[in-house]
């Protein structure tokens, strides 16, 4: 799992303090992303676990229209607010974090296990993203 400390070591940015209004807006936007996208993935470009979950979604399941929010492309202060919020929401601060129809599915390990035993496809079928024959895709 990839944390913001790893990002902090990789990138040196001037971090300023956000006021509560700015934090609230970032949280509102993050929650909106989770709710409006059928599949929402929070990840980081350099994270091997994020690359692994993308491999599952894009190459193995051949999904399209997955919304990916690369946190390391945000300003550090924004990234930290998002990760703090995700921790409140899911109990996990690291990435990747996958949401389907607004529901938290898991990080890399949980998603890999669900993919291996067929539960991920079941979730996608119930969300009307995959059809039961698993060859046609709605998105």
Image (cartoon, rainbow, N blue to C red):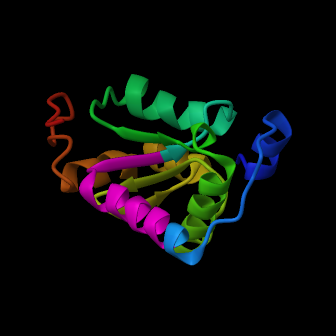
Q: Which residue is drawn at 77% across and 46% down?
A: 14
Q: As drawn, is 132 to the left or to the right of 38?
A: left
| The image quarter in which residue 11 lies | top right
Q: As drawn, is 92 to the left or to the right of 27?
A: right
Percent x, y of residue 33:
35, 55
**Span colored in magenta:** 24-41
**Dominant SS in magenta:** helix
In this view, the residue farthest toward the right is 9
Tell me, yes or no, if residue 74 can be seen here. yes
Percent x, y of residue 40:
38, 49
Q: Which residue is drawn at 46% across and 50% down?
A: 114
Residue closer to the observer: 63 or 65: 65
Quadrant in which the C terminus appears: top left
Tell me, yes or no, if residue 117 can be seen here. no
| The image quarter in which residue 105 lies | bottom left
Residue closer to the observer: 91 or 135: 91
Q: Residue at x 61, y 60 (%)?
A: 83
Q: Which residue is drawn at 56% across and 42% down?
A: 43
């Amino acid at each position: 799992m990839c944390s913001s400390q790893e990002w902090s070591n990789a990138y040196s940015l001037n971090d300023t303090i956000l006021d509560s209004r700015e934090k609230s807006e970032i949280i509102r936007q993050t929650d909106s992303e989770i709710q409006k996208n059928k599949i929402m993935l929070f990840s980081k470009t350099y994270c091997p676990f994020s690359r692994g979950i993308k491999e599952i979604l894009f190459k193995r399941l051949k999904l399209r229209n997955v919304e990916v929010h690369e946190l390391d492309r945000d300003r550090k202060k924004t990234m930290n607010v998002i990760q703090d919020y995700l921790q409140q929401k899911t109990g996990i601060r690291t990435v990747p974090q996958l949401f389907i129809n607004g529901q938290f599915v898991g990080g890399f390990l949980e998603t890999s296990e669900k993919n291996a035993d067929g539960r991920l496809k079941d979730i996608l079928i119930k969300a009307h993203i995959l059809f039961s024959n698993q060859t046609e895709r709605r998105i």
